[in-house]
Amino acid sequence: MTKIDPNAPIGVFDSGVGGLTVAREIMRNLPMEKIIYFGDTARVPYGSKSRDTVIRYSRQIVRFLREQQVKAIVVACNTASALALSTLEKESDIPIIGVVKPGARVAIETTKKKRVGVIATEATINSHLYRELIRQMDPEITVVGRPCPLFVPLVEEGWLHDSVTETVARRYLKDLQDQDIDTLILGCTHYPLLRSLIGEIMGERVTLVNPAYETSLALKRLLEAGGMMNPGTARSEFPYRFFVSDAAEKFKHFANSILPFDVNMTEQINIEEY
Ligand code: DGL
């Protein structure tokens, strides 16, 4: 590992806007940390792409973030965490964490019936990583996965409280309602924004796990253990920078709807150059 400057920012990336739900939790739980966020808005969605493509995209983003001198990287995208993280970890000389493992760990701690549901993109479900990690830690747990691909465009359309979204959600979640699960992982960056609707449909006996929140806590533990927490002394006035690969204005609009402050500046870069 290279020598790490605690004042350096944390790199957070996602296929687009969804990773802001992870960035938001990091901002809440690690208020002294600076963040460089990259959303791959030109190439979203990752959820329907192959492993090779997601690895190639993720490598380019890691190169870009390294150029920004980040001290650690959070793969805020479930799909990239499921398909590319193990490769990125092997290649990285700074700490790099994803959202899948923290989510899996909490699901294990939460389930009493040992029956866990996972909703995510097609690629994440087909990778079976949530299932593998959970069963490695507790082989008695049954994991039932369900892809919910339409949730991503519905959230991006802003239809969080809409009858169309409710109809789609009821249809997707129907199978899971019959599976006797007591824990459900929201295994895609966008799904925490539908939390109240999903919670209402699944009922109060099902606990929803938000990997975004758990990831921010895992990051905190990692920074503490490595003596990498930002002491806050060299903090710039506005500690967050946002980069995208396309449609900066649209990104800003979405960011302003979910972050507790206004994102005034979003910089567009050509990620294919990395
Ligand atoms: N960020 C992705 C995820 O968490 C959802 C959007 C996409 O398919 O790229 O899996």
Image (cartoon, rainbow, N blue to C red):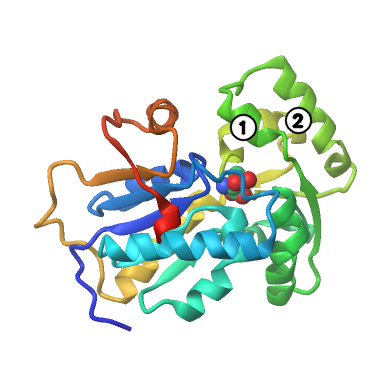
- Amino acid carrying label 1: it is Leu
Can you give x and y, in whole percent of width and height, for residue 250 in the image? Answer: 44, 27
- On the picture, is 83 further left or further right than 71? right
Does residue 67 lie above or below 2 as drawn? above
In the image, taking residue 183 as reference, residue 215 lies left or right, namely left
Q: Secondary structure at mark 1?
A: helix
Q: Which residue is mark 2?
A: 169
Residue at x 44%, y 38% (from the top left corner): 246
In x, y percent, where is residue 156?
57, 29
Q: Is residue 44 left or right of residue 29?
A: right
> What is the number of the mark on residue 194?
1
Q: Quadrant of the N terminus?
A: bottom left
Where, by quadrant of the figure, is residue 237 drawn? top left
Rendered location of residue 108, percent (x, y): 67, 63
Q: Quadrant of the C terminus?
A: bottom left
How many C-alpha atoms fall within 10 Å of the one at disc 2: few (<14), some, or many (≥20)?
Answer: some
Residue 162 visible (yes or no): yes
Q: Check if mark 1's residue and mark 2's residue have beta carbons within 8 Å.
A: yes
Position of residue 119 measured from the top left corner of the image (x, y, whole percent): 72, 47
Task: Tell me the residue at 50%/55% (across/down).
Answer: 214
Locate residue 70 relative to residue 43 in the image: left or right.
left
